[in-house]
Image: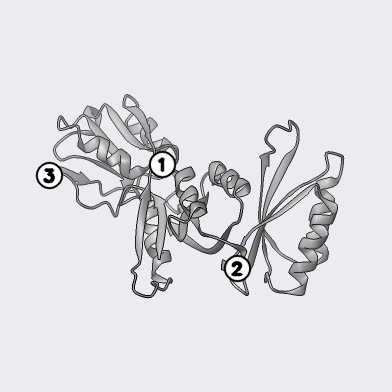
């Protein structure tokens, strides 16, 4: 079993991939491994092409909400489905060269979301440091450690290992909100990979562009007695003024209730797509 993730090793996506891997069975004569990729289009593209068996993809953060890029990629993909979920606690730390004072650090490297999630610390404690966005927290750590002068630092996970000699992990969690969690999904190819039974279903719908259409959609869900656990909107590409709603709900995908619910949503909306069940 090969699971793709946003690399390199040591990223939060790598941690999630390792957790997902614990529940997977290695193929006969094969082995389980986590495979890094440079960005999320490559991660999901590897699943679609068959290079890997699955992908660990962050879909929502408790501080910043949905990961828009990955929501869009899931929607646009053909035949990819979320089949498992994992909630990972995020513990951002400053990684810097020992002996260097915070006020001496001129650059901080990290993923955009990590920088945003530590904005209070960065603005109050490091207001003069330039923030450098990287494709992942692990890439940011690599960039910081390349600077032997000690003028660069990174924001990465407390789990960071194999640091270059002289670099240390700070003792303080930098997140604006200490209870910071990211919701990851395990994505596989083919509807047959979805579990026979599930606790939740994840789908999208586009409502007609008229008054009350969203209320009608929510009323359908309520009429089946289904608890909606998440709803988020994203613009429909090339159709200004129209929005797609990403909805997660407590429901067994194999139940007659779920089948009837999704059937009615499909009938009464412009578009409806099942993204997964877990």
Disc 2 element: helix
On the image, the x and y values in percent for residue 36 come to 36, 50
**Gap in angstroms between the C-alphas marked 1 and 2:** 35 Å
Q: Which residue is mark 1?
A: 114
On the image, the x and y values in percent for residue 34 come to 36, 58
Residue at the image point whose x is 43% and y is 72% from the top? 23
Residue at the image point whose x is 42% and y is 36% from the top? 119
Give the side of residue 252 with respect to residue 45, left or right: right
The residue closer to the viewer here, 85 or 212, is: 85
Mark yes or no: residue 80 visible: yes
Q: Which residue is mark 3?
A: 165
The image's colour scheme reads: one colour
Q: Which residue is mark 2?
A: 192
Q: Residue furthest right?
A: 211
Q: Using the rendered view, name the quadrant where residue 28 is placed.
A: bottom left
Mark closest to the chain's N terminus, 1 or 2: 1
Disc 3 element: loop
Which mark's residue is nearer the viewer, 1 or 2? 2
Residue at the image point whose x is 60% and y is 56% from the top? 79
Q: Residues within 10 Å of mark 1 (few under 14, many from 20)?
A: many
């Amino acid at each position: 079993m090969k699971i793709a993730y946003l690399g390199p090793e040591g990223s939060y996506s790598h941690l999630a991939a390792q957790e997902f891997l614990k529940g997977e069975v290695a193929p006969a004569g094969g082995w389980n491994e986590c495979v890094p990729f440079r960005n999320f289009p490559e991660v999901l593209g590897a699943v679609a092409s068959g290079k890997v068996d699955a992908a660990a993809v962050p879909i929502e953060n408790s501080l910043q909400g949905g990961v828009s890029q990955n929501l869009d990629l899931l929607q646009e993909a053909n035949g990819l489905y979320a089949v498992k979920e994992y909630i990972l606690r995020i513990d951002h730390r400053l990684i810097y060269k020992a002996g260097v004072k915070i006020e001496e650090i001129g650059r901080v490297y990290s993923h955009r979301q990590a920088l945003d999630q530590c904005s209070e610390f960065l603005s109050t404690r490091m207001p003069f440091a330039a923030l450098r966005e990287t494709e992942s927290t692990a890439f940011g750590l690599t960039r910081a450690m390349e600077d032997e002068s000690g003028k660069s630092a990174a924001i990465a996970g407390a789990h960071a290992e194999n640091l270059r000699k002289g670099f240390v992990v700070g003792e303080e969690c930098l997140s604006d909100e200490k209870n910071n969690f990211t919701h990851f999904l395990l994505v596989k190819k083919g509807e047959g990979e979805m579990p026979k039974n599930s606790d939740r279903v994840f789908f999208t719908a586009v409502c007609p562009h008229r008054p009350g259409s969203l209320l009608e959609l929510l009323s359908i869900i309520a009429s089946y007695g289904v608890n909606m656990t998440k709803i988020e909107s994203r613009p429909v590409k090339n159709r200004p003024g129209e929005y797609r709603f990403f909805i997660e709900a407590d429901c067994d995908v194999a139940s007659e209730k779920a089948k009837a619910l999704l059937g009615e949503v499909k009938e009464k909306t412009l578009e409806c797509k099942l993204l997964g069940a877990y």
